[in-house]
């Protein structure tokens, strides 16, 4: 009620200048943990991509890259992302590994484009994508699900499987729509 006074009192601790040693140690621990986690996901994702590129069932290892298991699976997904400008199985495979960790998108592209000795990944990507296509891919990668580890966190926060699936679907649909708009408006304006 407006007339009643609250008896709730919060006592704030005194503010102090941070201790540089404590600040450095805390920052170092958090950075080390992030690098360890990111390196684990990137290394693991890179190994999985390499295995999927090198193996096709009974044929064994060392198959041509365009006939690998990853190429076959991602060729099914490529037409879905074709209206966004990057309808290749290589781009679709990078999006799949990007779901594991966004940091693995670049390493996946380096593997699937099989950068020869003496060339750079930048050179290979500039041959495979126009600037508009690359921008569309970056927009999609930026907006779809941050990474696999966020899905359980979303589930814990919302407390419902239905809302978790809705959130994941919403992010993917939003990324698709924005990337579609960026690519097609760019084409209308004459950018390539």
Image (spheres, grey):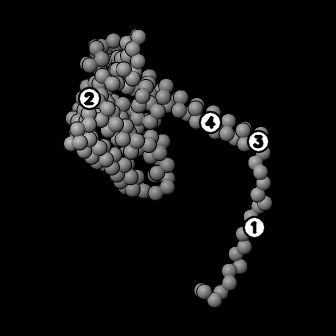
Which residue in the protein does label 2 denote? 88
x, y percent for residue 121: 40, 21
Position of the N terminus, as image quadrant, is bottom right
SS at mark 3? helix
For residue 189, above or below residue 74:
below
Quote the CA–CA distance across marks 1 and 2: 59 Å
Mark 1 or mark 3: whose residue is earlier in sequence: 1
Which residue in the protein does label 4 denote? 31
Q: What crowding class fits label 2: few (fewer than 14 Cα within 10 Å), some (14-19), or many (20 or more)?
A: many
x, y percent for residue 130: 29, 30
Quote the CA–CA distance across marks 4 and 3: 16 Å
* Residue 14 relative to residue 44: left or right: right
Mark 4 or mark 3: whose residue is earlier in sequence: 3
* Residue 163 relative to residue 79: left or right: right
Please tell me whether mark 4 or mark 3 is closer to you in this view: 3
Rendered residue at 46%/52% (across/down): 155
Which residue in the protein does label 3 denote? 20
Q: What crowding class fits label 3: few (fewer than 14 Cα within 10 Å), some (14-19), or many (20 or more)?
A: few
Q: What crowding class fits label 1: few (fewer than 14 Cα within 10 Å), some (14-19), or many (20 or more)?
A: few
SS at mark 4? helix
* Label number found at residue 11: 1
Mark 4 or mark 2: whose residue is earlier in sequence: 4
x, y percent for residue 188: 21, 42
């Amino acid at each position: 009620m407006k007339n009643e006074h609250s008896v709730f009192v919060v006592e704030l601790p005194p503010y102090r200048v941070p201790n540089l040693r404590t600040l450095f140690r805390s920052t170092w621990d958090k950075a080390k943990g992030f690098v360890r986690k990111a390196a684990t996901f990137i290394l693991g994702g890179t190994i999985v991509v390499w295995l999927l590129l090198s193996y096709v069932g009974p044929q064994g290892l060392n198959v041509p890259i365009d006939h690998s298991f990853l190429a076959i699976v991602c060729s099914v997904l490529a037409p879905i992302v074709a209206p966004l400008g990057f309808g290749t199985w290589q781009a679709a495979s990078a999006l799949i590994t990007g779901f594991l960790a966004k940091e693995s998108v670049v390493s996946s592209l380096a593997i699937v484009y099989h950068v020869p000795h003496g060339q750079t990944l930048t050179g290979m990507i500039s041959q495979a994508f126009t600037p508009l296509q690359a921008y569309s891919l970056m927009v999609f990668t930026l907006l779809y699900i941050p990474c696999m580890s966020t899905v359980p966190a979303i589930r814990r926060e919302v407390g419902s499987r239905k809302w978790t699936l809705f959130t994941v679907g919403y992010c993917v649909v939003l990324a698709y729509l924005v990337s579609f708009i960026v690519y097609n408006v760019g084409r209308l304006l004459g950018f390539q």
